[in-house]
Image (cartoon, helix red, strand yellow):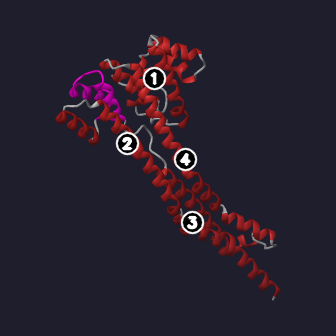
Amino acid sequence: MRFPWHSRRPPVETDAAAAEAAPVLHRLAVLLEAGTAPDAAWEHLAASGDSASRRVHERRRAGEPLTDAIAAEPGAWREVAAAWHVATTVGAPLARTLRGMAEALRDAQQARDDIRVALAEPTATARLVGWLPLVAVALALLLGFDVLATLRHPVGAACLVVGALLMVGAQVWTRRLVARARSVDGVPGMSAELLAIALSSGVSIGRAEEVLASVDVAAAAADREVLDLSTSAGVPAVDLLRATAKLERHRARIEGRMRAAQLTSRLLLPLGVCTLPAFLLIGVAPMLLSAMTSASVTL
């Protein structure tokens, strides 16, 4: 079975899509536990005004398989479609699966929110400092320096061009540093979560891995360790895998906070290499050149 994420089109990951998925899954779980059929549950949610549910229901009415209709939604809905496919394939409790996915998505969204808040201050500071050379030009004009006249001088024009290039370089460099500090897309510990869903139906480990392979998910090294421990100790692996998934999400949150903390010091690199030289070339050099030109004319 091929889901929409197998296409070459890059996935669209938005915080809005991830944030709205968790409450929808909780409502779906409640409806399914009450005995509502899956298609009818999606129809009820679509009638309630939920936009994602409405689009899924419309695709379903057009004849598209339900898992494909779910996977066509952006962001976290792809993970939801994978979990839905695994649960329905092996016969795992669908309502419990959706509750577990809702909890996983909330944890992942909380981690993204924490990282975004931690990045807000250094990012805003870097953007503000990036405009410092232009502030220097405005200050020079207020002080009465004929900065614009210096642009006709070869040295003044060269300072402007080099300074502008440095400003652009600082902006690009800063954006790349911020992008690296942001959290990666997806839900950490997803392979362990899907394995737990598959094994909760009572299937063998080999069968569970086959079902995961159908959605292009392979067991991670940590998952293998849990499966080996479960086999050697003779204990169920489901709870161990779910604990592993929670640990992966916790580690992702801590690593994201560490990246955000390190960003503050790393942003000093474009500041020292690009922004400050641009400030001197665009703001200070024209003022000096204007003063020298005025002095030579007076003499």
Q: CA distance from mark 3 to mark 4?
A: 22 Å
| Residue carrying label 4 | 116
Please tell me how crowded label 3 is: few (under 14), some (14-19), or many (20+) other residues with Cα within 10 Å: many
Q: CA distance from mark 1 to mark 3?
A: 45 Å
| Residue carrying label 1 | 70
Mark 2 or 4 closer to N-term?
4
Q: CA distance from mark 2 to mark 4?
A: 19 Å
Q: Does the stretch in magenta take in 149?
A: no
User: How would you classify the magenta stretch by its main secondary structure?
Assistant: helix
| Residue carrying label 3 | 271
Q: Position of residue 15 (x, y in %)?
A: 53, 37
User: Which residue corresponds to the image point at 63% horizontal and 62% vertical from the top-left?
Assistant: 129
Callout in the foreground (2, 4): 2
User: Which residue corresponds to the image point at 37% horizontal and 42% vertical from the top-left?
Assistant: 248
Residue 204 seen in render: yes
Mark 1 or 3 closer to N-term?
1
Three-letter residue code for mark 2: Glu
Callout in the foreground (3, 2): 2
Q: CA distance from mark 2 to mark 1?
A: 25 Å
Mark 3 or 2 closer to N-term?
2
| Residue carrying label 2 | 248
Q: CA distance from mark 3 to mark 2?
A: 35 Å
Three-letter residue code for mark 4: Arg
Mark 3 or 4 closer to N-term?
4
Taking 183 as reference, is 16 above or below it? above
Task: Tell which of 266 and 286 is nearer to you.
Answer: 266
What segment is highlighted magenta in the picture?
A: 190-218
User: Which residue corresponds to the image point at 60% horizontal and 55% vertical from the top-left?
Assistant: 121
